[in-house]
Image (cartoon, rainbow, N blue to C red):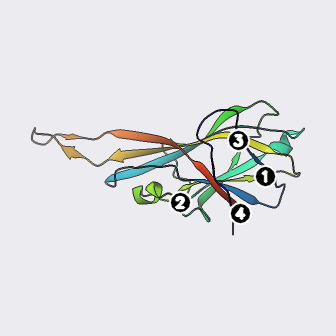
Amino acid sequence: SFAFSIRDSDTNFCRHATGTSNDWLVVTNFGFSIPTNVIIEGVAVTRVGYGVGGGAAQREYQIALTEDGYYIAGAIKQGNALPKDIQDTNTLGNAGDLWGNERTPDAINSPSFGVMIADNDDGTQEICFNQILITVYFDRLPSVRNEPGVSEISTDSATFNGTVASTGQAP
């Protein structure tokens, strides 16, 4: 187990290379404080990174959400092949994507909520991540203004960076 920040886009990278063994890089502790009286409508995960393998198949990865820092909670998504030796940014999920599970503010506010990333290729070439961001989209419950019969509904989102907490094999 180890911990370091993957919060800022800088010269520090988290390097992960496991080939087909499906060891997962776990990024948690995003520090969300979403109000508990909202409806979660979607989650987007943005990664900044690159791969070192020669072919695109050697730079593939999978990504999933976790609510407990150990088990996958919902769908596993296949990320586009990382570019070779030049970092880029890619987002999976969106304002209407719950990744196959209903999400609650309490689960997202937990320090154990985060992202699990697996090297999904046929070799042991590194995939490297500079930054992982999670954006959570939510709707506030209707609130009544002073005018009779008028309600306001607004949509908000919150984006936070996480900390790599551990690596391990997902069950």
Label 4: which secondary element: strand
- Disc 2 from disc 1: Cα separation: 23 Å
Tag 1 and tag 4, C-beta contact below 8 Å = no
Q: Which of marks 4 and 3 precedes in the sequence? A: 3
Residue 160 x %, y %: 50, 42
- Disc 2 from disc 4: Cα separation: 14 Å
* Residue at screen point 84% across, 54% down: 19
- Disc 1 from disc 4: Cα separation: 15 Å
Which of the 4 image quarters holds residue 116? bottom right
On the rendered structure, is 153 left or right of 25?
left
Q: Which of marks 1 and 2 precedes in the sequence? A: 2
The residue under label 3 is which amino acid type?
Phe
Residue 171 x %, y %: 69, 69
The residue under label 1 is which amino acid type?
Asn
On the rendered structure, is 27 left or right of 113?
right
What residue is shown with label 2? Answer: 112
23 shown above or below 79? below
* Residue at screen point 71% across, 58% down: 24
Q: Which mark is residue 129?
A: 3
- Of residues 144 and 32, the one drawn nearer to the viewer in this rendering: 32
What residue is shown with label 1? Answer: 120
Question: How many residues crowd around disc 3 within 10 Å: few (fewer than 14), some, or many (20 or more)?
Answer: many
Residue 56 x %, y %: 84, 39
* Residue at screen point 83% across, 58% down: 20
Residue 2 x %, y %: 67, 56
On the rendered structure, is 57 left or right of 66?
right
Which of the 4 image quarters holds residue 9? top right
